[in-house]
Structures are given as structure tokens and as C-alpha cells.
Image (tube, rainbow, N blue to C red):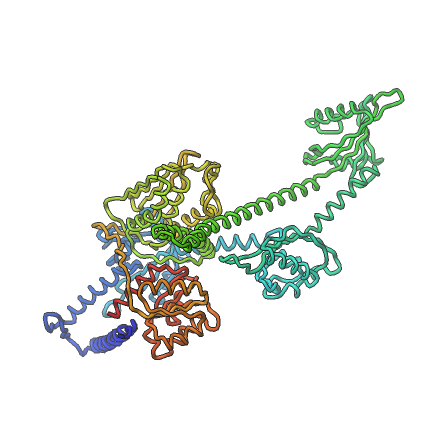
Amino acid sequence: MTPLTSPEEPLRAENAELRARLEEAEETLRAIRRGEVEALVVETADGPQIFTLASADAMSNRLRGEILSQVNDAVIAMDLDQCVTYLNSAVERQYRISAGDVLGRPLSYIFSRQWPSADAEAAMWISFREHGEWRGEIIHRTLDGRELQIEAWLTRLRDADGADAGMVTVIRDITERKRSAAELQRTNELLDTLLRTAPIGFCFLDRDMRFLRINERLAEINGFSAEAHLGRRVSEIVPAHAESIRAATDRILATGIAELNHEFSGETPAAPGVTRCWSESWYPVRDGAGEILGFGAIVEDITERKQYETNLQESETRMRLATETTGVGIWEWNVLTNAIRWDAQMFHIYGIVPTPDGFVQYSDWSRAVLPEDLPESERILRHTVRLAGQSRREFRIGRRHDAEVRVIESVETARTNAQGETEWVVGTSLDVTDRKAAEIQLWQLAADLSQADRRKDEFLATLAHELRNPLAPIRNGLQLMQMPGVEAAIVEQTRSMMDRQLTHMVRLIDDLMDVSRITRGKLQLRKEHVPLATVVNSAVEAIRPLVERLGQELTVTLPEQPFIVDADMTRLTQVFQNLLNNAAKFSDRGGHIQLNVERQESDLVVTVKDTGIGIAADQLPRIFEMFTQVDRPSEMVRSGLGIGLTLVKRLVEMHGGKVEARSEGQGKGSEFVLRLPIVIEASKPQASGVEEEKPFKASLRVLVVDDNRDAADSLAMILRAMGTDTRTAYDGQDGVEVAAEFRPDVIVLDIGMPKLDGYEACRRIRDEPWGKSVVLIAVTGWGQVEDRRRSREAGFEHHMVKPVDTRALMKLLAGLQAGKQ
């Protein structure tokens, strides 16, 4: 068996040769500087050639020009009058000018500097004169009106005699970096502000009842700082309530159901000896597999609300039993004479200065209220007169004499005289403005919490529905394949169905993970130059089975001239696939979907248009928000989590583009328009890059190590069916021991395992003489750049994310098999 060559061996040899050549060149350069060399003899393809120092300088200058033309930073050289003597291609791209238009002209033909102040500009020239260089950040205004935030290096140039010959500046465009940093800062500030200013407390606990996170409001309720909570158990912070909290979390673990709106009272270290009241709701926090990792809590201090309710009851009791309760104004109106009497509290309610005796008598009602309020006041009082012997209570808006609007609670009763005539209307008035405002705030808070609970419940229900949907056919397919006498064609059809459903489930989980990574700034694009046609075709092929199943027509129009974009091919394909999938799901059977690509100036414009249900005008502004889906007709089934368009918007923006949604209304279809910057306009059609998949039969020896026995055994069965000699192990320690005896060519090694994790198992295998030539493939649920870097450092050559794409694994093994042969 031929051992597999380490890819590091040729690199080490090449580096050693380059170091030797570099040392030789440096020694030659030192000799030239000492004046010991007048000419150079250089070995070329045409034999030895003699170069004078002048020709060498010319070649060096050409070489420098070629190097500078390849760098991404803009490089500009100027003479002493700041006229341009050299610029690289990055300058032309960045400032959208031509070298022939600006060479020999002043620097202002390329851009103008926008200094924050005259002092800043003066400081630059002082630094340049004293030190011969300057570095800083400023704004450049280009000739076409754009403003670029740049980082610049300015360096003095000298001639052979050491005299000033000009200057060179290196410019790096940091506009996008600044924008991203500012956006990230704004997002973080918003989140911090929401947590800091939330009127209710919240926290997260692990299963051991340790605080993982807590906001300042709840920390204040508990009487400790937020930092003092972290890592400590509930029993250490609020021991008096630990039992009741543990009882709630135990019920969640047993049932998986949240514990909502539990009210209790007691004391906390924040206010010893003072009884407070709280309302708590506890929710299970789950991982992607549905396992409960811990608990989230929303805690509201309702002491004031409870006290308010008590006070309100007492106030109503006092209103019924006493007429001189503080805050209640008493008034009388003589229906026969129109005279009015007020007590002192009425003056306060309506903002009038009372008389010394505490009462004032007006000649008529119009003297007691503002003129604009008189008609309504008289209407109420006349109605009361007709209810002789009865009382009535009402709330009305009253304006004080200082024009301040108040809410007045009024109780009125009509009394008759000895002749049976209604003579007096007696009433009490109470200013309840503050109470009503508090009630409105409580109602609004309750409505907001109800809306949040509704959206949360809808999302959780949708998530459960979407995950269960593919599980049902997968389970049915397994049972069907286990039945005796099933025809081979049905088995193959069942396999295809199970593969589609599993792919759908993986996509749901991937979408959730992608949204989480983007929100936390953890998603990184691996960009490369790719033909846009290849990306579009890949998305179209992925969505074609759904379109055909729904009997829809899909039309794709691409420009004849191929275009190259700087993109992460997988993520950009995901964008088009999500849009096409969205168009198919929201269109009726037999509908028409169009995907059109055209060039508009420096952008590629991609339009995805359908004849589906359309988008209502009030929903268009929210169509890219998380968990948002358009309203569907009752006969259409809701599907998806409402995060596909959110991913589209975030990913397009990460590629430097924009996306917008358009619709003329419900029932009139919808249209999504993407704008992406063009990188290269190709001169001829690009290859599709899709290789024909070939059957794989290998004689490799493969060891599969995974603590999930079903995963290990099923993968081993697939590999054996391909002709490999495959064994399995179910933990890291067992994997190392089996490998020592089996001596495999390839080891597929899970990372998270008992006894030894995959990293340590890999290191131990690499320490063995026989393990240095083994190809190690890491298998894990984590696939970010940092995860791949860590697996490489541990000794893995390859990194695959669960669930493993068996076709990709077969292609990798086929390459290894070809290398053996």
C-alpha cells in the first residue's frame, strides 16, 4: 500500500529553496550598494545575459509596476508639485477614472480631501515635513460625487542624492468597513437599550438553576448586581423562592410546557422586611434537537398594581360611605334658580382659587365651566333632572380653567322638594386622570405582552408543524421499506421521497442556524469569482422538482454575455433558491414563475416574478421581517417558518447588493428585485462547473467512529455497499484502539464523543507511526470558519458538517482511491 504523501512536504522544500534564493539576492543587493558591482550576469532561457545597473534598474521598475498593479490598495506617486506620475489599476477602479486622463495632472483630478477641520489638514503636513510620512483616516470626494472613507499612508520620495523627489500615497477604501462597524454598533446599542430599559425583568437559567443571563431590572428586584448573579444558583440569590421556582422548572422538565402567570409574594434582599408581589412566567429553552437546555423567565413586580387595585376598592367604598373623602369635590345645582355651590375640592379639580369660606355661589351654571364645555354640562344635568330620585355615575372629559384636560368621575342625584318638584341636583366629582392613565398603560402592556405571546406561540407551533411534516413521510417510508414483498420500483420511489423530506428538514434547521449566525455577526462568506449563470442554474435545478410537482411553468432568461460576481456560491444559490421556492409555494397550480437577469449600468438586476397570491399593501413594508408571512387564502396551506425572506435580505446585503419586494395587491402576483455589483464581464461563455457524477467503487479500508450507533452503522453500510472494507467504533478511546489494530486508510471521526473527543483521538492517532499517513475526516454539527480551523490544527485533513452528504463523501473517497492507484 502506497502511503499518502503529506501536502506539507513540497511546501517545505519550496520554502527552503526560496529562502536560499532570497539570501543570495540580498547579498547581491548589498554588493551593488557598496559599489562593488557594475554589471550582472543572469542565467536566462536563452543563455547567460549581461545586464548593466541601468538596465537592472529599468527591469526593477517594471517589476515594481507589475507588482503594484496587482494590489487591492490604491497607489499614487506624485512629484513635488503634487502632479500624478504613477497610479496603479486599483486607483482606476476605486475612483472610476482612467490613468491616461490624470497622469501629469494635479491630484485634484482624482479626488479632493474632506478634512474635518483646517487644524487636521495642517497637522498632516507638519507630520509629513518633520517625519517624511503621515498616516490617518479622512474622507475623499470623487469626481462623480461619491464620498469614500479611506485610510491613507503618505511617504516622502527621495532621489539618489537624498533630495526630495516627490511623494507616494497608499489608499485603502474602508467605507464598507466603517458602515458595517457603525451598523453593528447601532444594533448592539439597541439590544443593550432594550435590555436596560425593559420595564419587566428576565433571566435565563441552566438545568442546574444557575443564572446564565439577567437584565438590570430583575437584578434590581433581587437586590444584587447583574454580574453577581452570573454562575450562581437561584438558592444562593433568592433562597426564599428557590423551592417554588424549582417546582415550576420540574414541571416544565416533566411536561415540556411553559408555566405562565404565577403570582406570589415575599421578601428579597433588595428590600428586607418589605413584602412584594410578583408575576412570573417560565419557558423551556431548547436546542435544535428539542432537548431542554434550561429555562427563560419573565418577572414583573406587580406590587404597585396590586396596591392600586386595593386602593381603588377602598376609594370606591369611601365614595359610597362618605361625602368628605379627600379628593372628592361636592357641588349642588338649584334647578329652579340656576344657582351653583362648590366646595373647596371642586375649585382644585377645575383650577379655580376658592373663597375664604370654602364655598362659592355662582348665579348660573355658565359661570362655573368654560364656555365651550357649557352645552355638554347642561345636557348631562338636564338628563339627571329627569331621573329624579335616582343616581347616575359617568366619566367625562373636563377642562380646568387653566385649559388642562382632565378625566372626571361624577356621581349625580336629583332631589325633589315638598311639592314634588325636582329642585336640587347634588353631585360629587373626582379627578381620576392619573388612575385612567395608569389603567391605559396596564391595558397597553397587557396587549403588548399578549401580542408577543401570540407571535411566540405561532412561531413555536409553526416550527413544530414544519418539523413534524417531513417526519411523517420519513417514518412511513421506513415502515414501507421494511414490509416483505415490496416492489423494487416502490422502494426506489420511497427512497427518493425520504431524501426530499430529509433535505427539507435539514434546510429548516439550517435556516434557523443561519438567522442566528447573521444576527450574532458570526456568518462569514467565502467569496470567489463565480459565473452568475452557474448560481442561477444551480438554484433552478434545486427547485425544479417542486415546480413540476405543482404543475407550474418556470421561465429563466439570462443575458448572452456571461457575467462574473464576487460571491459565496453556496449562499448566493440559497438566495435564489429561497425566492424561487417562495414563488412556487405562493402560486396556484399551473401558475407561471419568471426569473430574469439583465445588466443595468454597473449592476446585475435579477427579477423573480410570479402569478401567485400577491402581497397586500400594508404587508409590503414588513415582508422581510423575521417570522412574517403574507396572509393566504383559506385553501392554501401555510408552510415555512417565515424566515426565508429575512435570510434573502441579509445575505444579499452581505454581498453588497439590495433587494426589494413589489406587488400590486392580493391576487395580482409579486415581484422581487435584486441588485448585485458586477465584478467581471466575461468575454466568452463560462463552463457550468458541474461535473458528471461517476459511480464509485473503492477498495479503501475505512473506520467510522461515532457515539451515535445508528449514524455510525448506517454510514458503514453505505460505505460497504460501495466496496470499502469498513469497521465501526462508538467512542473516541475505542476508535483509537480499533484503528491501531485495523490500520485503515481513512477514518471518519465524530468530534463530540465520550471518553475521548474527536480532537484528542485525532492527536493520538497522529502520534503513532502508522497514523501519519491516515486520512482523517472530521464530522460535526459545527461548520463555521473557527470550527474548521480548530479541526485542521488538531490534524484533520477534511471537515464535514452533519448530516453528512454521502455523495460528497463518495467523491472525496474516489479522489483518495485515485491517489492510491
Residue 367's image quarter?
A: top right
Residue at x 57% of width, y 60% of height: 294
Residue nearest the viewer, comparing 138 with 326: 326
**Count of marks placed on residues:** 0
Q: Position of residue 492 (x, y in %)?
A: 35, 52
- Side of 91 where 62 appears, left or right: left
Query: How far across and how far down the image is residue 705, in percent?
Result: 41, 69
Q: Farthest residue in the front direction? A: 485
Tell me what residue is drawn at x 39 percent, y 45 percent: 581
Which one is nearer the viewer's eye here, 819 or 43? 819
Foreground pick, 717 / 435:
717
Can residue 611 be seen by looking at this rendering?
A: yes
In the rendered image, the residue lying farthest to the left is 46
From the top left corner, tell me how far across and down residue 45 is, in percent: 12, 70
Query: Image height check: is 134 above or below 530?
Result: below
**192 or 633, nearer to the observer:** 633
Measured as percent of width and height from the top left, residue 353 is found at 77, 36
In the picture, the quarter occupied by the N terminus is bottom left
Question: Horizontal placement of 64 versus 124: left or right?
Answer: left
